[in-house]
Each structure stands twice: as C-alpha cells, then as structure tokens.
C-alpha cells in the first residue's frame, strides 16, 4: 500500500481520484532518508483559529513543531542544516512566506501545548496555584481558573494531578503566557465533555487576534473551537499531505465524506455517515428480549459513594454512558463485570459471558500482538473474515503483528485491546473510553464494529466515552451520570438517546443542532438565535 493507487488500494487505506503529485509536490520535511515525508503546511492567519484534522502518523505534530519554530524544515534532505534565510528563500513568493518571515525575523513569541503531556507532568515541581501565578504574564489567572473550572485542583501538587487535571493545567499555562502564536496539540485528551467545551471556550476567549492552530480528534470540539480547518491525509508513517483551508463546517464535512472538492482528491473509500435512520434500525418496541438487568445498586469506596438506578438492556443494544470524570462510570463498569461487589443490589442473570476493555491500558501481556490476538480467538487472523477486513486491517493492526505488546504506543495498545475485546464471543461487552488515543477515522472504525457485533451477536454493549459524536453515531440509549465528582455519583436508568442527551446537555446548558448536509451534531454558539430558541423549547439535542 503505497497510498497512491488509482484503484482500490490493497490496504484500503486510500484511493485517489486525481493523482496528487506526490513526487512533484513540495516536500516540506523528511526526518530520515526513506522515512516519513510531509507535503505542505497550513497557512496560519492572524485572528483565526486554524484546526488541523487527520489520522495519526500523518504529520500533524510535525506541522505544529515547524509552525512554532522548534523544527526547521529541511525540504526533503535530512542532512541539510538550513538557516532561517534558506527556509525563507524556499518560501519566497508563497502565501506562507509572511508568517515565517515574522516568525524568524520579528521574533514572534510562540507557546506550544504539546501532545504527550505525561512527560511534562513528571518534570514539574510545585502546586498548581504557585506555578500558574509565576507564569501569568497577562494578569488573567482568575479568568483562566474560572474558564477551565480549576477550583478543585488549585492547591494540588502538579505531580499528583490526574490526566484531565494535568491537561487543564497545561492549557491554562499556555493561555497565561503573552504570546503572538498559540498552538495546541490534542487539548481534549483526558477531558470530559464539559471540560472539553470549557477548554474550547477558554482558547477562544484568550487568543483573540493571535495566530492559533489546534490539532484535535473530537469533531464536536474542533467544530466549536476553530474558524478554518485544514485536513491532513496520506498514509500513516509514510506521508502526509496538507489540504487547502476550508471553513470549519465545510472542512469537517469534507473530512467525513473522504473527499476534498477544491483539490479533487478522494482520500478514503467510505464516507462516515451520521444517518438518523440508523438510530432506529432496530425496533426495540417489538419482541426484543432483555439480555441483562440490574436492581438499584449502591457502593461506597472510601470518600466516594455511588448509587445506580435499576435498569435493563435488550439484545443488540448499545448503551452509551456519559458523565464527568470522577463520577463513578468506571466503578459501575467494574460492578457489571464482577470486579467489584456492590454493597447493595445485584446484576442478573448470573453467568453472562463478559468481555471488558478497561479504561486504564496496561501493557502487561508478555508476547507479540499476533500471540495476543490468537489467544483471544483462534481464527481472528484468518484473512477471509469480515472482522479481519473491517477491524484488524482498517486499524492497521496487521502491520504490527510482530511487535511486542509491551512496546506499543497508547494508540496501538488501545486498538489492540478494543479489537481483542470485540473478537471475544460474549453476551456483554463493556468498553471503558475506547476512543482515547484514537484518531477520528479509528474512532469510527471501532464504533461501526461495536454496533455490528452487538447487533449480530444479540449482545449488549456498555460504552463509556467522552466523544459525544460517537454516542450520537451508535448509542441506542444513554445512561446519564450526575453528582459531585470524587464525592457522590448517581447513574440514571437507560433512556432514549434523545432524552438522555437532552438531559445531559441541559445540565451543561449547551444546545446541539444538526448539520444540514451530513446530519452530524454541532454545538450552537452560546446566546445565538438557535441556542435561545432551542432552550425555550427544551430541545437541547435537536434531531432536525
Ligand atoms: P501525527 O501527529 O499526525 O500523529 P507526527 O507528526 O507525530 O504525526 O509523525 C508523523 C511521522 O513522522 C510518524 O511516522 C513518526 O513516526 C515520524 N516522526 C515523528 N517525529 C520524528 C522524529 N523526531 N524522528 C523521526 N521520525 C519522526
Ligand atoms: P469515572 O470513571 O466516572 O471517572 P471512577 O468510577 O473511576 O469515575 O471513580 C469515581 C470516584 O471513586 C473517584 O473519586 C475515584 O477516585 C474513586 N475511586 C475509584 N475506585 C476507588 C477505590 N478502589 N477506592 C477508593 N476510591 C475509589
Ligand atoms: Mg501528533
Ligand atoms: Mg472512568
């Protein structure tokens, strides 16, 4: 799969209607000989937030490093040591020249929130409040604390922060710096829905009139946050090409369609469709059998108490679970799979076959990817099955069969564990945050497989996730978790997607409308005409 086949690629990775000039196009960067190649750069525009959308391994972080001046592009020669003037000469006469001229000669000040925040967390010493006070060059510390709801973590030591808290800390630190250019690499990772939208609001409010670029995989966040979007397409670890800038709405729609009209390039075989009729493809009002049910459940864990309403789920049903971090979603999953015994209540019938993908990904398996998969299911790797075609191949797991599980990256481990969990024959699938570390394409590949397997095996899937577009795409009913994070959680009974989402969005005072062309959900701008109208009608989650 070189990625530039005219017909269907053997890896189904990509197909191009109009051959892009891979060879003649301008190479911006190549790390090593015969290694990954980046073609093109998105143009930053002052006063606009530029979104960068594309699959993993196609150069998004590389682009941010070049735009922030950390990496000097080599235009394809890994041994070239180019000066700023060399680079400017290369860009002369192009739209991008202006930006680099300012970056290199006028010393634009840049802040860069990096993708892999775990490392940053380990290097920092001190508590949140002290460190942010030291950084605050703009006198906006109170505003940032409010915007990102950081009250509960204000006096914690940075070393002890959870993933979500660390992400908020680093976004806050970036926003408190006085800079000309702000770049954010995957800021929604680890954040719950409310935190994602707060983060988006914070970046919007505090980067007016600046140069801003954001890479993210949450389409709802990207849509809400950015003005213009550039799509990066290509083949993971082989090459990435940068599209023209589109308005955020059109760019995201083009991305879903897998087709870029301005450049006449089809970069994906299938469209990603938000088809509302799919939501009702199983008529649960008719003869559908209850597969699992539970009584009211209570559980105390030191300072935290959880209370779940009684409920049930029917054969073939995907139950989406939404709620903030620290509210007991994982605890409920662990009760379902019998890892935690409740203080009160039960799940029935007994003896259901469970397949569980925990939230925490621990690479504790001793062996290769192939051994891991074959251990789960003997014929998982037989190339004739749809599972191999639609899951293993599309997630590119077939290319890392020889790798040791302990050496995998977060994204690879997630794909392996999700594929493993789905390959297992079970009555109940329990998937805790399967979309973290995955790019948008992978999220939809996984979501489609979840739905198909749940339906075909007449199983039930419990799906905890913070990506609301994914719930919109496959969840049949929704359980809403509310309460006080870290103190008490209340899990409601499953209710229809419409009612559940409505309730969840209402609590956050956010309204969703539908995109007219693709049917995908979009966040209304606060106080806009539709936002006010929908709130008046109590229609926070519109199906039209
Ligand atoms: P993305 O952010 O879209 O996932 P990256 O920009 O991180 O992609 O990486 C694109 C490709 O470049 C990957 O194949 C990666 O392995 C390679 N790459 C990234 N950084 C380096 C580096 N410092 N040296 C060599 N290869 C690298
Ligand atoms: P969520 O998945 O919604 O983020 P969790 O179920 O993981 O929430 O956790 C809910 C709360 O319970 C958190 O405050 C967490 O620290 C606490 N908690 C989870 N497991 C334990 C445990 N074994 N002992 C004590 N507290 C726990
Ligand atoms: Mg990246
Ligand atoms: Mg959890």
Image (cartoon, grey):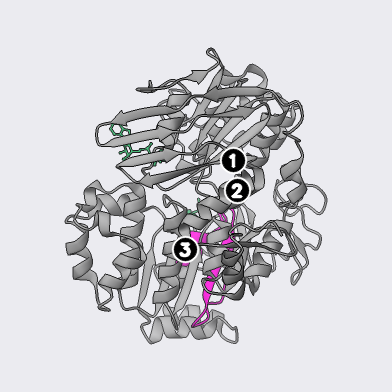
Residue at 42% x, 35% y: name it: 330
The picture places residue 144, in percent across and down from the top left corner, at 32, 69
Q: Measure the C-alpha gap from mark 1 to mark 2.
A: 6 Å
Looking at the image, tell me whether mark 1 or mark 3 is earlier in sequence order: 3
Q: Is residue 253 left or right of residue 64?
A: right
Up-down relation of residue 15 to residue 342 (above or below)? below
Crowding near pointer 3: few (<14 within 10 Å), some, many (20+)?
A: few
**Which residue is labeled 1 in the image?**
495
The picture places residue 37, in percent across and down from the top left corner, at 58, 59
Q: Looking at the rendered structure, which numbered label has been put on residue 79? A: 3
For label 2, the SS is helix
Residue 57 highlighted magenta (yes or no)? yes
Residue at 26% x, 71% y: name it: 141
Query: Are dots 1 and 2 in contact, CB under 8 Å?
Result: yes
The picture places residue 350, in percent across and down from the top left corner, at 52, 13
Foreground of the two, 389 or 97: 389
Residue at 23% x, 46% y: name it: 160
Crowding near pointer 1: few (<14 within 10 Å), some, many (20+)?
A: some
From which residue to which does the magenta span run? Answer: 36-65
Q: Measure the C-alpha gap from mark 1 to mark 3.
A: 60 Å
Q: Looking at the rendered structure, which numbered label has been put on residue 499? A: 2
Crowding near pointer 2: few (<14 within 10 Å), some, many (20+)?
A: some
Tell me the quadrant of the picture where the C terminus can be found. Answer: bottom right
Q: Of tags 1 and 3, which is closer to the observer?
A: 1
Foreground of the two, 315 or 270: 315
């Amino acid at each position: 799969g070189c990625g530039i086949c005219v017909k269907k690629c053997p890896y189904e990775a990509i197909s191009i209607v109009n051959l892009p000039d891979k060879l003649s196009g301008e190479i911006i960067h190549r790390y090593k000989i015969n290694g990954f190649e980046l073609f093109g750069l998105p143009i930053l525009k002052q006063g606009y937030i530029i979104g960068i959308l594309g699959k993993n391994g196609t150069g998004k972080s590389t682009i941010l490093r070049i735009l922030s001046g950390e990496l000097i592009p080599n235009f394809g020669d890994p041994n070239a040591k180019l000066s700023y003037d060399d680079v400017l000469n290369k860009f002369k006469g192009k739209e991008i020249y202006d930006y680099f001229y300012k970056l290199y000669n006028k010393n634009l000040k840049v802040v860069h929130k990096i993708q892999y925040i775990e490392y940053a967390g380990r290097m920092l010493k001190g508590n949140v409040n002290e460190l942010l006070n030291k950084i605050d060059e703009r006198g906006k510390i109170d505003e940032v604390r409010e915007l990102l709801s950081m009250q509960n973590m204000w006096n914690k030591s940075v070393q002890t922060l959870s993933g979500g808290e660390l992400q908020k800390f680093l976004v806050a630190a970036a926003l408190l710096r006085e800079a000309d250019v702000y770049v954010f690499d995957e800021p929604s990772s680890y954040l719950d829905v409310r935190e994602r939208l707060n983060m988006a609001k914070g970046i919007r409010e505090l980067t007016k009139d600046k140069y801003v670029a954001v890479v993210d995989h949450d389409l709802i966040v990207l849509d809400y946050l950015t003005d213009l979007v550039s799509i990066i397409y290509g083949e993971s670890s082989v090459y990435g090409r940068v599209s023209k800038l589109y308005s955020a709405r059109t760019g995201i729609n083009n991305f879903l369609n897998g087709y870029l009209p301005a450049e006449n390039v089809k970069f994906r075989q299938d469209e990603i469709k938000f088809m509302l009729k799919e939501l009702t493809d199983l008529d649960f009002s008719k003869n559908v059998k209850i597969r699992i049910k539970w009584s009211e459940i209570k559980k105390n864990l030191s300072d935290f108490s959880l209370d779940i309403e009684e409920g049930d789920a029917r054969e073939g049903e995907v139950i989406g679970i939404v709620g903030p971090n620290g509210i007991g979603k994982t605890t409920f999953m662990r009760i379902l799979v019998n890892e935690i015994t409740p203080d009160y209540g039960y799940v029935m019938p007994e003896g259901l076959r469970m397949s569980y993908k925990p939230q925490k990904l621990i690479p504790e398996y001793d062996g290769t990817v192939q051994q891991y998969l074959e251990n789960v299911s003997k014929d998982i790797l037989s190339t004739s099955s749809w599972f191999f075609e639609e899951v293993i191949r599309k997630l590119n797991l077939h290319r890392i069969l020889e790798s040791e599980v302990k050496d995998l990256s977060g994204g690879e481990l997630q794909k392996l564990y999700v594929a493993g969990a789905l390959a297992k024959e079970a009555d109940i699938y329990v998937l805790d945050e399967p979309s973290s570390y995955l790019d948008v394409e992978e999220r939809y590949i996984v979501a489609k497989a979840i739905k198909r397997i749940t339906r075909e095996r007449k199983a039930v899937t419990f799906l905890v996730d913070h990506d609301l577009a994914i719930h919109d795409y496959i969840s049949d009913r929704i359980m809403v978790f509310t309460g006080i994070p870290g103190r008490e959680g209340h899990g409601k009974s499953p209710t229809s997607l419409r009612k559940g989402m409505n309730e969840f969005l209402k609590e956050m005072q956010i309204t969703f409308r539908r995109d007219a062309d693709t049917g995908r959900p979009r966040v209304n701008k606060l106080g806009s005409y539709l936002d006010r109208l929908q709130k008046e009608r109590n229609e926070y989650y519109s199906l039209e």
